[in-house]
């Protein structure tokens, strides 16, 4: 699916149109982009991806059970997008970042299950990861980190000069 979308975005203007509608739909509409069609097309693509994910889930479990298949997948999807560095509000996105984020989430889930953590506690650990991502991504924390790194670099330069 990633290769198909990479080719689709590379050879068409769909990525640019989707980003422009996601950033500011009314401005995109004023520039001649049919934002309603782009949103509809995005939801159609989303439906195809959900169908593929559902098929993979059914084949892994070997059972069609509406109560357990893809249970709480929405938190994993949000977390994968956030870990991938994409904006949760829409706009610019990197598909590769979301894929890497999905692998990280799956690795975290498998590791926690291998450590015999209960399924309800796994949700709590994932929620903690989401909270940490939000805190680390906040402008205040980024500013303080940049200030810390600048002070550290100046101290390192001063010690190198003195030595």
Image: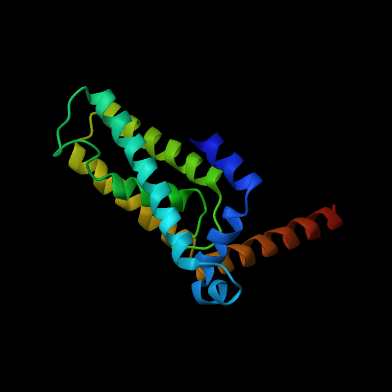
Q: Where does the image place residue 157, in percent across and percent down from the top left?
A: 80, 58
Disc tally is 0
Residue 65, by quadrant, is top left
Q: Where does the image place residue 135, in percent across and percent down from the top left?
A: 43, 62
Tell whether 85 sits left or right of 11: left
Residue 54, by quadrant, is top left
Q: Where does the image place residue 124, in percent across and percent down from the top left?
A: 25, 48
The answer to whether residue 89 is seen in the rendering is no
**In the image, residue 38 above or below residue 100:** below
Tell whether 79 sits left or right of 162: left
Q: Residue at x 69, y 63 (%)?
A: 150
Q: Residue at x 24, y 45 (%)?
A: 72
**In the image, residue 14 above or below residue 72:** below
The colour scheme applied to this rendered structure is rainbow
Q: Where does the image place residue 21, in percent across and percent down from the top left?
A: 52, 66
The answer to whether residue 140 is seen in the rendering is yes
Residue nearer the viewer, 72 or 158? 72
**In the image, residue 152 above or below residue 23:** above
Q: Residue at x 75, y 56 (%)?
A: 156
**In the image, residue 110 above or below residue 35:** above
Q: Residue at x 56, y 71 (%)?
A: 28
């Amino acid at each position: 699916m990633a290769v198909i979308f990479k080719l689709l975005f590379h050879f068409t203007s769909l990525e640019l149109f989707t980003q422009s509608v996601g950033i500011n739909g009314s401005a995109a509409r004023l520039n001649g982009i049919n934002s309603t069609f782009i949103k509809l097309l995005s939801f159609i693509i989303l439906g195809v991806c959900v169908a593929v994910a559902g098929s993979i889930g059914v084949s892994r479990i070997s059972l069609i059970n509406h109560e357990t298949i893809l249970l709480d997948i929405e938190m994993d999807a949000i977390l994968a997008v956030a870990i991938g560095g994409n904006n949760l509000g829409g706009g610019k996105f990197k598909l590769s970042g979301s894929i890497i984020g999905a692998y990280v989430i799956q690795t975290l889930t498998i590791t926690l299950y291998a450590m015999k953590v209960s399924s309800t506690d796994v949700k709590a650990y994932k929620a903690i990861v989401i909270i940490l991502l939000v805190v680390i991504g906040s402008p205040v924390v980024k500013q303080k980190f940049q200030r810390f790194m600048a002070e550290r670099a100046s101290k390192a330069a001063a010690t190198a000069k003195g030595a």
